[in-house]
Image: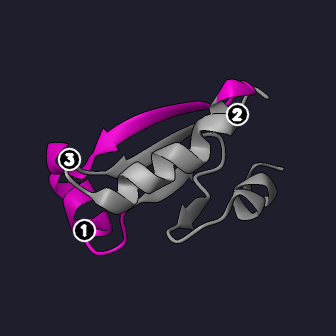
Amino acid sequence: MHIQCELFGTLGCHLCGEAELLLQPFVAQGLVVELRDIIDSPQWLERYALTIPVLRRTDNARELNWPFTADEVYQFLA
């Protein structure tokens, strides 16, 4: 698996922590996930403040909003 994603979230977001845990098996299989703190960008903050965590593919910009399951992530990456 050579897909790269960004996970938009912020420090102290317990849902973001849950999303990171859910993604660990995918990372173990080669998925690259860069954590993006929405505080670092006014555009990210405006876009994602009410929807984090959000998983975004870097190759096609598709996004998967929380809540998502492992099955939904698998479909998202297929």
Q: Is residue 67 left or right of residue 53?
A: right
For this rendering, which residue is in front, 25 or 66?
Answer: 25
How far across and how far down the image is residue 57, in percent?
60, 46
Callout 3: few (<14), some (14-19), or many (20+) C-alpha neighbours within 10 Å? Answer: few
Q: Residue at 51%, 45% (x, y): give it.
A: 21
For this rendering, which residue is in front, 75 or 61?
Answer: 75
Q: Is residue 27 left or right of residue 15?
A: right
| 44 in magenta | yes
| 69 in magenta | no
Which mark is on residue 10?
none
Q: Which residue is mark 1?
A: 49
For this rendering, which residue is in front, 61 or 35?
Answer: 35
Amino acid found under the numbered disc labelled 1: Ala
Q: Is residue 26 left or right of residue 11?
A: right
How far across and how far down the image is residue 38, in percent?
24, 51
Please identify the quarter of the rendering in which residue 25 is found.
Answer: top right
Range covered by the magenta-colored residues: 28-52
Q: Residue at 56%, 40% (x, y): give it.
A: 5
Amino acid found under the numbered disc labelled 2: Ile
**SS of the residue under disc 1:** loop
Q: Is residue 24 above or below residue 7?
A: above
**SS of the residue under disc 3:** loop
| CA distance separating discs 2 and 1 | 25 Å
Which mark is on residue 3?
2
Which mark is on residue 11?
3
